[in-house]
Amino acid sequence: MGEIIMHDVPSEPAAKRLKMDQLVGLKQEKYTATSIVSNSSGAELPKTTEDEKANAVDEIEIDEVVTKYIKIPELPKNIPKLPQLNASEKAELERTFQFNSNIDNEEDTTEDGWHEDWSGNLALIKKHISNPLLKRRKPHKTEMTLSLLEWAEQRSTQSQARHLGRNLLAHVYSSAPPMAQKILSHTSQSWEQDPERYDVSNSIKRCSYDPNVLCQDGWTTKPSKEVSPEAGRAFGGPAHIGQHINWQGYEAVVIAYVHDHDIGDLWKAMWLDGFETFDVEAEELQAAVRKWNQRKKRYNKSEKKVPGTDATSNRFAATKDFHVDGIEHGVILATTYSPNARQGVFWPARVMHASEPDISSTQRKRSSAKQKVSVVFLAPYWNSGSETSIVGAGSVVGPRAVDYSSLPLFQMESIEVSEDTIQKYPYGSTGGLNRHQLQVAFRFTGLPKNAFRRFLQSHRLAVALKMYATDEIGTRPLSLKDAKAALFDTHALALKVPRFPAALLHLPFHFILSKIQTQSPESTSADVNSNIDPPIDLAFIMKSMEPPHCYGKNSHLNEKGNGVQDVEKKPKDTRSLSTIDSPVCKALASKIDMSQRAAEVIDSHLQVESVLSESFRQELEGLSNTDLPSASLLENVKKLVARCNRVTGNVVAIQEDKELKIRKLRSLLQECLREKSYGEDVLAADGSLLEREVALTLVQWRKACERLIQYVTKKCSSEGFGNGVTVVLSDSRCNQHITKIGCVERPVRLPAALKAAKLAGAGSTASFQFQYGVEDHYMKLANEKFLEKAHTVSYLKKIKGRCAALSPDAEGAHLTEGSDGEGGLDTTGTRGTYDAAVAGVAAAMKAVDLIVGGQCVNAFCATRPPGHHAGRDLHPMGAVSNGFCLLNPVACAAIYATTPPSQGGLGLKRAAVIDFDVHHGNGTQDILCSTYDPRFLYVSMHAGGAQINGYESDDPDVDFPRVGSKKQVGIFPGRCGDKSPHKGVINIPLGPRVTPHGVGASLLNIIEPGVEEFSPD
């Protein structure tokens, strides 16, 4: 490709023609740049000299399409030529690129040699090859392979790889167009002079999109509607230059066109993310343009929507906020879709909780499932499966009347949520069932008379369940139920119902109902009281099944004349959340409603009776008369209550000095936590109590201390401070972390997260704050004390040194490869990456500080780089890499929270980490729970399990994949998250896909009871 010929003016150099046109203001004549190879005889073509051509290439007009997206820098003048390679140097390149290796015919043999065109040979610099120092003709199958540019960035191979790269540029130089020669020569020269700072990859990439190079290589770079007669084009030709397309899911733009006599029309396009180029043919271009137009149409359609409207269907929007009174008791009136039932008749039903397994065989789309709930109809009359149909009141058409007593007592069904299918359950509020009201209601159903017994049984079951839910389970605030509903393929109503014990749901209800006398629908009594049926006492039945009552000992029974044995009822547990919505101030179960009592004293002085339940106070009084260490607990509580009353009064009185208020509140809360920790230690060491008694006493002690913390937090709260405040934290230093182009962990993730937080309201109110920037003393605390508690000193020095060695403008450098050069390809960064990672750790420590100090109830840290794959050292728990992570903020925050105040920490006794991600947090588990540590509980929900990661087996016939070799099998980071090594770890592999229902069921059935048992501070 020796020179450029301008067809219209063959006698003038191109540069002179362009200058003349610019001077006189004339419109440019159409010209075509074509490449001409030297003839076989080697005779020179009588055109411009090489110096004239080298000076002329810069004068070709720059195409407007490319310059809209890329700023093309000017090259210096008088760039020296690259020398030709000798035979040995060319042979060394062929050995490096492993030509003619034919590894088990796995590679395409058509690419196993030099290409005919210069651009194909230049692309070899990105071909994956084995270590160039080994000089192998045939690489091993399991050997790590990298491109020549990537080998040039490895410390062990950079000198040899750079030498080979410059030789490849010199080999391509001889056949490249003049402008490409200048680019290659400048690249080789700059690479040799400043190999650390010069961006070789982008410089070589310029050869693929530079308009001058494309024109000299035969491409047309200007859009035109004119078509050459010899091409026979039917799809627009150069008219598509500048057209946006969608290729492989990403946006691209057409930058050039050429007609090849063998292939036909060909267009060159460029991705706008990374500026890589590719060629497309006519059919491919048509499909890419069509995809772009469809995407643009969808975008325009979404832009026309009214802001604030829901994107879901109108049908779902109408029922999204549907609510029915009394749903917290779990019992409703509902209609069935069964063809054997009378349409429009509402029947008692229990709404199944979202965490209960749905045994129905029907598969539903998630969009439709969001409109439905699963219910269990109680004693239904329609599930006989016979040919009998109910058509009118008092009449049955069919072979025989239905024997309702033989029908199944329960039937599960999925129904849509609407006013037409669900109503409030109206009975049982006064503690009994008015039979007269039921008889009146039954007449309006139009059912036959012999169905009344079934009707009455269904309501007896409904009232029994309602009373049990009211007395034994209680109600919890519904503020978070709608948010949790997003995790399930069901309506939010399914999260607002109680979860009945499995033992209760499996009681012999057939037997219980058979022992109760049922009257006919016409039978009434003048005595109003005689028409009230007492509800079935399910709590009494459950209690009678527990020891010692289940043994039938007469000392625990009180026989009455009616033959019913009455067991003395114990105080009932009420499980309720306090009005303080804080992770620190969570109220646990109590034998009396202590949270309500604590709420009543918020505006008054706190009393010991508001903190300790009556039974627990008596227990502490009994201990106070002993010589045990726990004898002082009651007196300590009294002193602490008095101090809380005094200090909270002082804190509330502080108006101006916020720092003083923060210090006093922090000191008081830490004193409460210290007393809690001390009490747990002495009670656990109490030798006079049995193991079961110790566990119950510890629960009561923790409840009492948490009520005290609730009072302090609530009492000292004000607008924008304390209870009800959420904080979003970030830091500008996190923007210094820039990964390599094409990496999924991209810098755009941080502004996207911050934008979402602001759209959710962060920074708009005093109770939803946005704090941008972490104070320097948190950075100093992380660097000097807590990073080395989470990571080894050698690991920290290694990462910090690699970042510091990078040039200021280097981006996407590998940071976490091991001594063998492996494991660092995914985790890249810049010179500022280490400071960005430390800022993420400091933000997490500040968030813990704000929460434990009572300034807010929860915090969200928007930082980069991520951290849960960063362990004590490189590639924790046998992972093949660090998974984009360098330092572990959450592990450092947990260590900071549990470190004693004398060592700079906050002095908590226990901290729980709940990790939700598609990948297991191997780094966090490695730091906190490599062995059992009673301070930490690590919980992880992630994709994994034997069906995706395989399992280890000594059986040679096992076909399951095995994980553990250097070659990654399954899902990252491997089998380390498939099991829980000890009680300090709860790993929950969710299979190959992490579904909303899987996450929600894990939260409610595994994580919530596990964390409650661990009882973190």
Image (cartoon, rainbow, N blue to C red):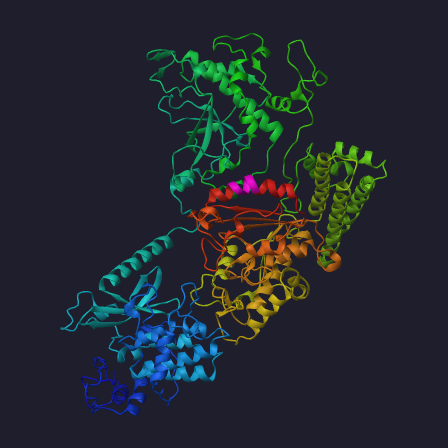
Q: How many marks?
A: 0
Is residue 925 shown in magenta? no
579 or 172, nearer to the observer: 172
- Does residue 602 appear in this view? no
x and y percentages locating residue 480 in the rendered image: 55, 42
Magenta stretch: helix, strand or loop mostly: helix
In screen coordinates, is 136 left or right of 620? left
The magenta segment: 1001-1006
Query: Is the residue 770 above or below the residue 806 in the image?
Result: above
x and y percentages locating residue 716 in the rendered image: 71, 49
Q: In the picture, which quadrant includes the N terminus?
A: bottom left
Q: Which residue is drawn at 46% across and 85% down?
A: 193
263 or 731, nearer to the observer: 263
The outermost residue toward the left is 229
x and y percentages locating residue 720 in the rendered image: 64, 53
Query: Is the residue 406 above or below the residue 170 in the image?
Result: above
277 or 476, nearer to the observer: 277
- Does residue 892 appear in this view? yes
- Quadrant hosting residue 902: bottom right
Query: Is the residue 1017 above or below the residue 331 in the image?
Result: below
x and y percentages locating residue 621 in the rendered image: 82, 35
- Quadrant hosting residue 206: bottom left
884 or 764, nearer to the observer: 884
In screen coordinates, is 99 left or right of 787? left
